[in-house]
Amino acid sequence: MHLISSPDYLTPLRVLVVDDDEAVRGTLAYQLDRLGHRVLEAGDARWALELFERHRPELILSDVDMPELDGYWFARQVREREQGDWTPIIFLSALNDATNVAEGIAAGGDDYLAKPLHPVVLEAKLHAMQRLRGMRDQLVRLSGELQQANAELQRQARLDGLTGLLNRRGLDEALQAALEQARRQHTPLSLMLCDVDHFKRYNDALGHQAGDDCLRHVAAVLGQLARRPSDAVARYGGEEFVLVLPDTPRAGAQTLARTLSRLFETHAMAHPDSEIAPHVTLSGGVTTVIPDQATTPAQLLSQADEALYRAKSQGRNRFVSL
């Protein structure tokens, strides 16, 4: 008859019992089995270490005084092999003075119980270990959830809320990474800066909701065009967008620009107040470099911005490459 009831949340433990005395070991195994726990038995420290590495028990009950290698040696070996995990170790010994307790804790033990061990004391200690395991498991789960939430927050912090593209922060990171890769591999890096022509007039004519829909449409088209995993598309601000195109020579970037212009003609969104065309159009500036150590993201953006300014000066609805 159990003097201590078992709450529903206390699940059985996988317990490793280590003792060179077969009778003591058998008695402990019987008591543990009666309480619903799963038992592994070892008669010496080396055997116990082999079982630990093979089965990874959730609790260790270990004798201290054993032939050849004692329980302290075994505990130190366990702690070296856990690699960030933690397995409670309770030492069992007829020696229970302060010096032995201190030596056991220093070797990696968590508790010390004197032999002969009373069944009620054993059951109480097992309940305590189960509660500790439950709290540890809960902390591990919470830690994992927090890490996931933090990763999602970091991801969201890099995205534009309206279009789902990278925002300025995300662009800075992507452009810096692309620049460093191109510098290491000595490959061309192209940057395209686009602007929706006469977007203010679009907003004034159709309203801000339609303007938001327009920006989302532009973002979707740009995202479909820059499909390679290494490509990056960002909303630069307002109606401006940036494409980062690693390993793309000038000719490839110019071909991409022409394709982009054709897409806006074939998937036209009506623009009721444009001086250029009856549909939404883009102007863009393209720059291509094989970067050296002096090349910076700010320089690339400045060159693309200068090319965009020339495209607008030449009548808009076009791309200029510098």
Image (cartoon, rainbow, N blue to C red):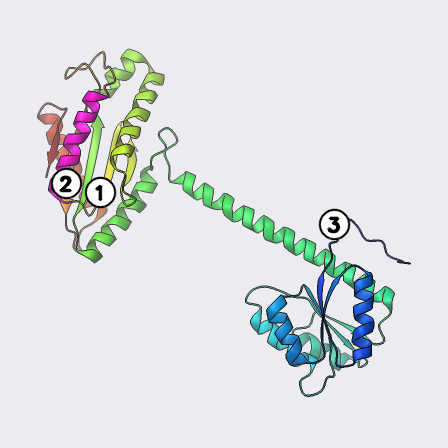
* Dot 3 or dot 1, earlier in sequence: 3
Q: Nearer the viewer, mark 2 or mark 1?
A: 2
At label 3, counting other C-alpha atoms closer than 10 Å, the crowd grade (few under 14, some 14-19, many 20 or more) is few
Check disc 1 and report the residue beneath it: 245
Of all residues, the one furthest to the left in this rendering is 314
> Residue 199 at x, y = what percent?
24, 20
Residue 78 appears left or right of 269: right
At x 33%, y 17%, the residue is: 210
Task: Identify the secondary structure beneath mark 1.
Answer: strand
Up the image or down, 60 lies above or below 142; here it is below
> Residue 46 at x, y = what percent?
64, 80
Task: Identify the secondary structure beneath mark 2.
Answer: helix
* Dot 2 or dot 3, earlier in sequence: 3
Of all residues, the one furthest to the bottom in this rendering is 68
Between 71 and 320, the residue placed more toward the observer is 71
Check disc 3 and report the residue beneath it: 9
Q: Quadrant of residue 185?
A: bottom left
**Is 258 a magenta residue?**
yes
> Residue 35 at x, y = what percent?
81, 60
Amino acid marked by disc 3: Tyr
In the image, the segment drawn in magenta is 249-267
Whether pointer 2 and pointer 3 mark residues with C-beta atoms closer than 8 Å, the reply is no
At x 57%, y 51%, the residue is: 143
Q: Which image quarter holds the C terminus?
A: top left
Task: Identify the secondary structure beneath mark 3.
Answer: loop
Label placed on residue 252: 2
